[in-house]
Amino acid sequence: MKFRFFTILPVLCILLSSAALAPAASERFQDTVALEGITRSKTLFDINLHDASKLELYLNVIQQTREDLLRQQVNPEIIIAFRGASVRLITTERWSFTEEDQQSLERSGRLLSTLLDAGVRIEACSIATNLFKVDNDTLLPGINVVGNTFVSLTGYQTKGYALIPIQ
């Protein structure tokens, strides 16, 4: 028993010290050169995924991106557009997913809700919902269905939104 404890103890100490340093390390990094003279940003995330865990990962990164912009005194305008098979990941219909994926989708739903509350616009493509047989009424609350995401992506880019594809 003692052997096991002393084997795990150094690993535990390293993990705890790394976790304690992580917030301090991220705080010292700035994007000053890229954000010089900018007080407002317009970002469009084009999501075309089919993996529940990847969606959760990227939604966390989008949330972090929003927080990083705010921390650096930039007011973010963010739009998240779901197209292709990704529309299956933003619905209340989850019976066809594994238990692990269902848990990821639950966490993703909470992240989407948080982003919506922060003013992020979230859209889903009606062509994709039709193609993947997703009933628009089962989409998570607050998600706007658009006619054709290619059209809306074109419009937002024409309005000056920076496009970030997530596949």
Image: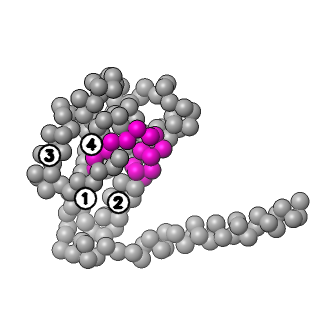
Front position among marks 3 and 4 = 3
Q: Secondary structure at mark 3?
A: helix
User: Spatial distance from mark 4 to mark 2, Cα to Cα?
Assistant: 16 Å
Which circle's residue, 2 or 3, is located before the other in the chain? 2
Q: What residue is at 56 percent from the left and 37 percent from the top?
A: 100
Task: Tell me the SS state at disc 1.
Answer: strand
Question: Is residue 51 inside the magenta stretch?
Answer: yes
> Between residues 20 and 9, which one lies in front from this camera angle?
9
Q: Earlier in the sequence, mark 4 or mark 2?
A: 2
- Is the Cβ of the residue at disc 2 closer than 8 Å to that at disc 3? no
Query: Crowding at label 1, few (<14), some or many (≥20) Cα neighbours within 10 Å?
Result: some
- Report, in whole angstroms, how far the alpha carbon at label 2 lies from the one at label 3: 23 Å
Q: Earlier in the sequence, mark 2 or mark 1?
A: 2
Q: Closer to the N terminus: mark 4 or mark 1?
A: 1
Q: What residue does disc 2 label?
A: 65
User: Label 1: which residue?
Assistant: 76
Residue 154's mark? 3
Q: Residue furthest right?
A: 1
Q: Which residues are magenta?
A: 45-60
| The stretch drawn in magenta includes residue 102 | no
Q: Amino acid at mark 2?
A: Thr
Looking at the rendering, in which quadrant would you find the N terminus?
Answer: bottom right
Q: Secondary structure at mark 4?
A: strand
